[in-house]
Image (cartoon, rainbow, N blue to C red):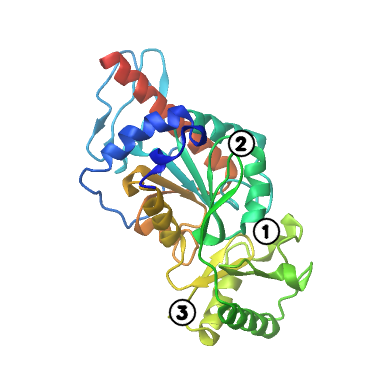
Amino acid sequence: MDSLLDFPRSAVHTSTEARLTSLFEMGRGEPRPYGRPMNLNLEPIYKSYDSFSINIYKKGHFREIAKEGVKMPLLNHDINLQEKKVVIADVDDTICETCHVISPEMAGQISAMIREGYVFAFISGTKQSYLLEMISSQLKEQHFLLATTGTQCLEAHPEPKLVYNHTLQEEEKKEIMEALEKLTAKFNIQTLTTTEDQIQDRESQITLSAIGRKAPLELKKQHDPDGSKRKVWVEFLKTVLDQHKYEMNIAGTTSIDITRKGMDKEWGIREFARYYGIPLHSIIFFGDKIHPGGNDYPATKIVDCMAVKNPAETLQKLQQLQKINNLNLEDQDLAR
């Protein structure tokens, strides 16, 4: 399979296929520079226009979208939103509240964008069974799940299909779990649920959920809101695990994810793009932990990123991205 265009027609919405035709042609051009997080201010800065304007872009910059009688957001950032047709998003605290099902409003927005031709993939340290419940149970359109930090890829519609899976070896799992047991003993980290719910084997990743994945959400939010406890814990883990073998990243609300070295969200996004033939410049990533030490930070090395604080902000920015591109398409039709 060379690209998403090679899916059977029944697997990809017609509008997605048509939109991606130009997307992949666009991918043959000159590569753009990456390697920086972009905390784009998509808060609506409104300006009224009396005249119609068609010249929307100059290279690498968003200029103006103006239409008579319409108030539109005015952006001027070094990012070309017109080329962003593939949305890859973190899950916990980005698409939904930690360990919760996505809201009807979020499901409706994502579904509408998929029907218009956007491709959506969700990347998370969470294992695939939870992502199917949290996301796929609410979406009826084609989308992708990049579970356990992208080490597993599922085509989630119409029926879940595992595309690839890079699992840890048993000896690796044993080594990581023993290190996490030393950590919980040294820092007296007590779970509110069960031991299995605190230290989870997710096949290609081992995750510590400090007070338990299924602990009450409010208690989880209060436990380590700024990540300071987990920064100390990660430093300890680096003394008992080989840093040349493993990645140790702060994730979610109370979690630390451990994978093989190099298998972070940069790797997960790159592998997904490579497998489906997606140009990296066509991807925009949404995440709530786009800062050094956060598990979303590696994504900044290869794609443009949009920092968000919570699902409400993600929803707002998705709505604005959709509105901007829809008006651009209308303007192109009028220009013909």
Q: Residues within 10 Å of mark 2 (few under 14, many from 20)?
A: many
- Residue 245: give its label: 3
Q: From where the camera sits, is residue 171 visible?
A: yes
From the viewer's perspective, tell me whether residue 124 is left or right of residue 281: right
- Quarter of the figure with residue 183: bottom right
Measured in 3D between alpha carbons, the distance from the residue under mark 3 to the one under mark 1, in whole angstroms, is 30 Å
Q: Amino acid at mark 2?
A: Ala
Q: Residue at x 25, y 49 (%)?
A: 32
Q: Amino acid at mark 1?
A: Lys
Residue placed most toward the observer, 226 or 31: 31
Circle 2 SS class: helix
Q: Which residue is mark 1?
A: 221
Residue 264 x/y as whole percent? 46, 64
Residue placed most toward the observer, 157 or 93: 157
Q: Which residue is mark 2?
A: 107
Figure check: 193 above or below 242? above
Q: Amino acid at mark 3?
A: Lys
- Quarter of the figure with residue 237: bottom right
Q: Residues within 10 Å of mark 1 (few under 14, many from 20)?
A: some
Measured in 3D between alpha carbons, the distance from the residue under mark 3 to the one under mark 2, in whole angstroms, is 38 Å
Figure check: 103 above or below 213? above
Which one is in front in this view, the residue at disc 3 or the one at disc 1?
Answer: 3
